[in-house]
Image: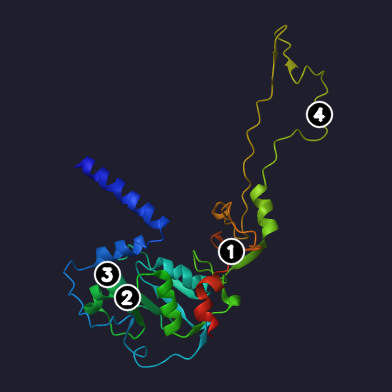
Amino acid sequence: AALDAYCLLDVYSTIYKKSLERDIPIDDIVVELMTSSGTKKPKKSKNSKGTGIQPVGKPYNSELFQPASVRSFKFVCGSGMGRVAYKLRRCGIDTDLLPNTMTHQELISCMHNLEDNKILLLKSTVYNAIKDQCPSIDRVYVINSKNPNTQMTEVLTYFNIIVTKEDLLTRCQLCNSSDLFAATDTEVGLQLNAQIPLNLMPAGEEDDEEEFDSWSCDPYYEDEYYNPTPPSAPPVPRQWCTYKNKVINLKKIPDTIPSTVTQFIICNDCGDICWDEEYFDNILGTHAGSH
C-alpha cells in the first residue's frame, strides 16, 4: 500500500508539472473532479447549443450593464478560479479569492455574508453542487468556461467593463493590494547585482606589524606561522525591502526578460514584483480596444 501511494504521488507530480508547462489549468480540473457528483452527464443533442455563462438571479438575468470603469466593480472568485482572479487584478479590478480548501458549507455561509457591493464568481461545477442550498441573492455569477482567458473576457464583456492601459498593474496580482510603486529597469538591475560588502578592518586600525606574505608570527611557537583571521564568508545577496519591510521577490525576474521592459511594479504589502510584456495588446486588445 505504501508503494502504491508513493507511485501515485510520483505520477501526480509528473502530471502537475507537465500541465503547468503546457498551460493546462490543472488546479481547475482537480477542483472540478472533487466537486462533481460522480453521476454520468447526459449526452448533448447534436442540435443543442451550449448555454455559455449563466448568471444567477436578478438583475443580471434581465438588465444590460452600462459601460463602466474597472473601479465600478468588486468581485469575489470561488474555488478553482485563482488564475482568472489574477488576470482580473492585473486589469486593475478589485478581486478577492476564496481558498480552494473552502468546504461547500463554508461557501454557502460566505454567500449569506457577501458584502452588498461585491459579486461572487463561481464555476458551474461548484454552483451545481450547492445550488439547492444557495441563499436568494442576486450577486452570484456562474461561469462554465474552463479557460482563464475566456473566463476573464466573458466577465469583462458581460458586465461591460472598460479596461484602459492606465488600469493595468494598478493592483497586486498576488494579494490584491493597491499600494504599489514603480521601479525602473536600472534600479532593479542594480538590486539584482548588489552584494553585501566584505567585512573590512575599520579605518585607522590597520596592522602595523611586519608582514610575512599576509601571515603573522606566533610568539609562543618558533618558526611556525598561522593566519589569525578566519577566511571571510562569501558575499550574500542583499535583501531589497518595501517601506512596509516586505522582501521584494527579485527571484521572480527571469534572465530572459525582454529588453523592452523598462518599468517594474512592486507591491508594498507583499513584495511581489510584476511587469508588462504588452499584456494589453496581447490579451485585452480585442475586447478593451472596442471600447
Q: Earlier in the sequence, mark 4 or mark 1?
A: 4
What residue lies at 48% left-to-right and 91% top-to-bottom? Answer: 66
Q: Which residue is mark 2?
A: 144
Residues packed near mark 4 inside 10 Å, few (<14), some (14 to 19) or many (20 plus):
few
* Three-letter residue code for mark 2: Asn
C-alpha separation, residue under disc 2 versus residue under disc 4: 73 Å
Residues packed near mark 3 inside 10 Å, few (<14), some (14 to 19) or many (20 plus):
some
* 129 to the left or right of 246: left
Q: Are marks 4 and 1 in contact (CB under 8 Å)?
A: no
The reply to whether residue 70 is in sight is: no
Residues packed near mark 1 inside 10 Å, few (<14), some (14 to 19) or many (20 plus):
some
Q: Which residue is mark 3?
A: 104
What residue lies at 29% left-to-right and 75% top-to-bottom? Answer: 124
Q: Which residue is mark 4?
A: 206
Residue 268, image x, y percentages = 58, 63
Q: Secondary structure at mark 2?
A: loop
